Image (cartoon, rainbow, N blue to C red):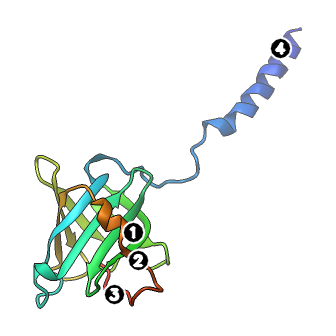
């Protein structure tokens, strides 16, 4: 009887070992203040383009995806989506078409209230983006440019 009980416990122990492992994905789970909707308040990547020549909103989601709505050199908003990774204060990401963030990695910081977020590019000298927490207007989401409507900008904020 003891032999059967020991054998049963050994089989049960071996069966439970795989359940103790991780998911196999070492990606950090995004959390904290980056999750939410943001409006780009200032961007110094192009010294010749004053702040009135662009309008950008981005939504960072808890599932490590983002939706970017930008109006740069276009009449309507262009929608871009993809995924991002936040390791401590370092942000990287990739658009759905496979293109990496242009200025990435970015060093991300927040003000004490968590309502202002600053990206400093570590690969593009002097590029700084400042975002303020703000809901994306429904009119922005509903008027994005489609490929058949008009040319889209080659410029990508991130």
Alpha-carbon span between mark 4 and mark 3: 69 Å
Q: Is residue 72 visible?
A: yes
**Res. 4 image quadrant:** top right
**Tag 3 residue:** 153
Above or below residue 15? Residue 8 is: above
Residue in view at x 45 percent, y 52 percent: 63
Alpha-carbon span between mark 3 and mark 1: 19 Å
Q: Are marks 2 and 1 in contact (CB under 8 Å)?
A: yes
Badge number at residue 100: 2
Look at the image and tell me in which quarter the N terminus lies: top right
**Tag 1 residue:** 93
What crowding class fits label 1: few (fewer than 14 Cα within 10 Å), some (14-19), or many (20 or more)? many
Q: Earlier in the sequence, mark 4 or mark 3?
A: 4
Q: Are marks 4 and 1 in contact (CB under 8 Å)?
A: no
Q: Are marks 3 and 1 in contact (CB under 8 Å)?
A: no
**Res. 121 image quadrant:** bottom left
Among all residues in the image, which is located at the extreme top?
1
Q: What secondary structure is found at the residue carrying circle 2?
A: loop
Using the image as rendered, state which of residue 1 and residue 16 is in the foreground: 16
Q: Are marks 3 and 2 in contact (CB under 8 Å)?
A: no
């Amino acid at each position: 009887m003891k032999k059967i009980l020991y054998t049963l416990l050994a089989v049960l122990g071996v069966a439970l070992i795989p359940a103790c492992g991780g998911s196999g994905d070492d990606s950090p789970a995004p959390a904290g203040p980056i999750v939410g909707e943001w409006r780009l308040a200032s961007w110094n990547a192009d010294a010749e383009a004053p702040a009135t020549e662009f309008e950008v909103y981005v939504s960072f989601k808890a599932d490590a995806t983002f939706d970017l709505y930008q109006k740069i050199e276009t009449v309507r908003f262009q929608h871009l989506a993809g995924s991002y990774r936040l390791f401590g204060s370092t942000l990287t990401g990739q658009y759905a078409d496979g293109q990496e963030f242009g200025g990435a990695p970015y060093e991300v910081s927040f003000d004490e209230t968590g309502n202002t977020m600053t990206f400093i590019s570590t690969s593009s000298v002097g590029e700084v983006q400042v975002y303020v927490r703000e809901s994306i207007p429904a009119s922005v989401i509903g008027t994005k440019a489609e490929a058949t409507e008009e040319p889209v900008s080659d410029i990508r904020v991130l």
